[in-house]
Structure formats: C-alpha cells, structure tokens
Image (cartoon, grey):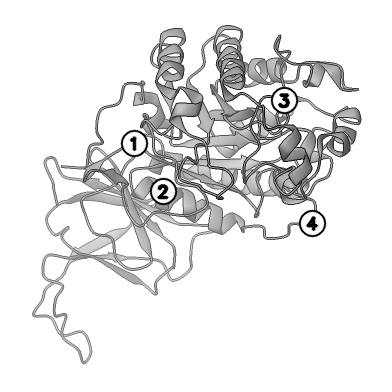
Amino acid sequence: MPIQPEPTVGDTSWFVHDRFGLFIHWGIYALPARHEWVKNRERIPDEVYQKYFDHFDPDLYDPRVWAQEAKYAGMKYTVITTKHHDGFCLWDSAYTDYKAPNTPYGKDVLRPFVEAFRDAGFKIGFYHSLIDWHHPEYPIDGLHPMRDNEEFRKQNAHRDIRKYREYLHNQTRELLTQFGKIHIMWFDFSYSGADWGWSKGKGKEDWDSERLLAMVRELQPGIIVNDRLEIGGDIKTPEQYQPTGWLTVDGKPVVWEACQTMNGSWGYHRDNLDWKSPEMLIQMLIDTVSKGGNMLLNVGPNGRGEFEPKAIERLRAIGDWMRLHNRSIYGCTASDFTPPPDARYTQNGNRLYLHLFAWPYRHVHLPGLAGKIEYAQLLNDASEIRYREIDPNATPQNTQMRGLAGAVTLELPVQKPPVTVPVIEIFLKEGATA
C-alpha cells in the first residue's frame, strides 16, 4: 500500500495531484539584478535603495505570456511574491505608499497576474514576507540591512513590532479579500532562534501567528498554508535541496514541496550563471514526485517584466518532456516497489512508471515484479517493451543470475529514445503489491 500523508486542514487534494508549480520572485530588486537579498547583502540604506523604486517601469510586462510559458511547461499552480523582505508591494495596498502603482510603471502588477494565470487554469498562491526592511516600525535586528550602523540602530530603538504586526495582518487581509479564490498562502519566514547578542530573531510571537493563521483560514476556507509561521502548517517546504525520502514529522509522512531555482538566485540575477540543465530540472521533478512531493520551480523576471531566455529555454524543454510523460507525474506518488539503480519509480494506481536516468545496454532488471506485470510500454511512443521473468538457475554466458529471483528483465532497444528521460509505463496486474 503506497504511503499516505497525514491529513491537513487545508485542501491538499488538488495539490498532491498537480505536483508541479511556478514560483515567481519579482520586485524592484530586479533592477540591481544582484539577488533578491541585495539590500541585505550590500547593507543598502532606504535612501539609496529608493533609486530602484524610482526607476521601476516594466514596460514589457505581460503576465499572459508568463502563463503561456508556465502552462506549456506543465505547471498547474503558481505562487508569486506579493511582497518580499525589502517591503515593496506588487499590489495597490491601502496601507503603504511603497507599492507598484507609485512607481513610474504606475499600475498594480499583481491583479493582472492573478487574472492571467486564473484564466489559463492555474491555482493561485501568494508568497508574503513576514519580514519588512522598509517599514518604519520593523525593529532593527541582525538580518536588517542597517544592522552595522550603530547610530541608526540607536535612533530607531523605539520601533514597535506591535504596529508592524497590525500592518502585516492588514495586508494579509487585503490579499485574501481582494483577489478572489486563493489556494495557497506562502509566508516567509520565521527566525526566532537567531541571536546576535544585541538583538534576537523574530518568530510566532512577533507575528502573532495563531491569530494570523486563524484569519487566513476564516477568509479562505480550504486554503493551503505553508510551514514558516512556527506553528506548523499544511505543507513542509524544503528549499534548494532534494530530500533523501518522503518528509516526515514525528515519524509520520506529510505533504511537502521542494522549492527550487533554475540558477542560484530567486530574484533576477544577471551575472549568476549557475544554471541547472533541463535534464537536471526534469530529473529533480521526477525525483521529487518519486518521494511523494511537489516541485515549485522558480523564475525571476527581469526589470522590464520578461522571463530571460535561459529560463524560457528550460521551461520549454521541461514542457517538451511533460507533453509526452505528464501522466508519470500528475496524480502520481511514491511507489512501494524498489527501483533499479539510476532510476526512479512513480505510481498511480496500477500504473507504475520507471524513469531511467541512465539508459542501460539492452536490459534492466526490476526486483520484486515477477508475476505482477500485465503489460509494459515506452511512454513517449506507446511502443511495447517485452519482458521476461528471471530464471535464477539460468547461466547467461559465464555468470549466475544470483539474487535476481522474483525479478523481471525488461528488453530495451539499444538506442535511447529521443527524450531527455525515458519512461516505461508498466501496467500491474490487479492487486499487485510490493
């Protein structure tokens, strides 16, 4: 029996079916193009960072194009940064002037995004930073861009987290009442364990996470909330690494989502050339689903509002693969069967999908499947793959087939199929289990 995750408060039924989403990190940090944490990394004061606000004018922004590229890639849901740590807001919030409509662009950029992606059939998610390096009441701590300016720290020692907390709650209410049905609320992040001596980190007490979460659930029943409020949540969100197996909490499997970038940055970073290959990204998606998880793959649009060519190239390569192989992803989860080396299994009911990361010469041996296969085919072209059960007493050339009793041998073509990762769809006999 395949692993079943713990029940959640939010409705994750669609989430664990769709498996693949688009993350968008976009804001005025696209102009310096040196990572979305540039204000923190370079300790930039507000008056200097203001130049990016004053010159934000994404004249080529068309979220319908973004949605088209994401849909072709096979993505089913999206999460966008409504506000990142620098405090800049993409929508026309009533609680701040630090927002897209007040830049040279002059318009709300979030509403057309929501409309474009919703029209394309996507579930909508909002990322919202709990941190705010622009807000005048957000206390200076060891993560703040002004952390090394002792004079500034003294002048701003009066800052009141309670006033900022109401701002955080008010903006969350705006996001969940002004844009229709929202499927995911993705908060980022808590760091109460941090201690710099002169300051400490912030967490659930500072955000009043219990009250915040209660409001979110009241305003959007069934919404999925992530795990960064320090009070649990519906999904775990490992970032920039691939877990070794299905994530658990207290020994019990949970719903989870791997958050990954295409290069080394979330926001647009012109000079970061650590691009993952399309093959690596496809393998990461497969690996994630084979462990019962989702993958949220990020794009950081540039300052003119476009996906850069390398991102589009990768989305289209993933889409080419997904067009032929998406039924090995959608609705699939981890399998109880053990795959051979350099391969991953996903499973949906009686359909077992073998993803071959390395193409073997002629044969691949599948342990534990003797007597359990009804039919097998390459998924890309539905061509039959013949197979035979291992006779442990047979002597092929000069070696015994020891240790392979109960296995099945698939007979593969010598030439690898013309796809990035070949998939063999195995139809299991009724009731077949590991």
- Which of marks 1 and 3 precedes in the sequence? 3
Q: Earlier in the sequence, mark 2 or mark 1?
A: 1
Say which label, 3 or 4, has the lower sequence index.
3
- Say which label, 3 or 2, has the lower sequence index: 3
| View extreme (left): residue | 393
Q: Is residue 272 left or right of residue 56?
A: left
Distance in Å between CA atoms under marks 2 and 1: 12 Å
Q: Give the foreground label among 3 and 2.
A: 3
Look at the picture and state if 321 lies above or below 81.
below
Residue 76: where, in percent of width, then height?
51, 30
Q: Nearer the viewer, residue 185 or 118?
A: 185
Residue hosting label 4: 271
Q: Earlier in the sequence, mark 4 or mark 1?
A: 1
Helix, strand or loop at mark 3: loop
229 sits to left or right of 337: right
> Hey, what amino acid is under mark 4?
Asp
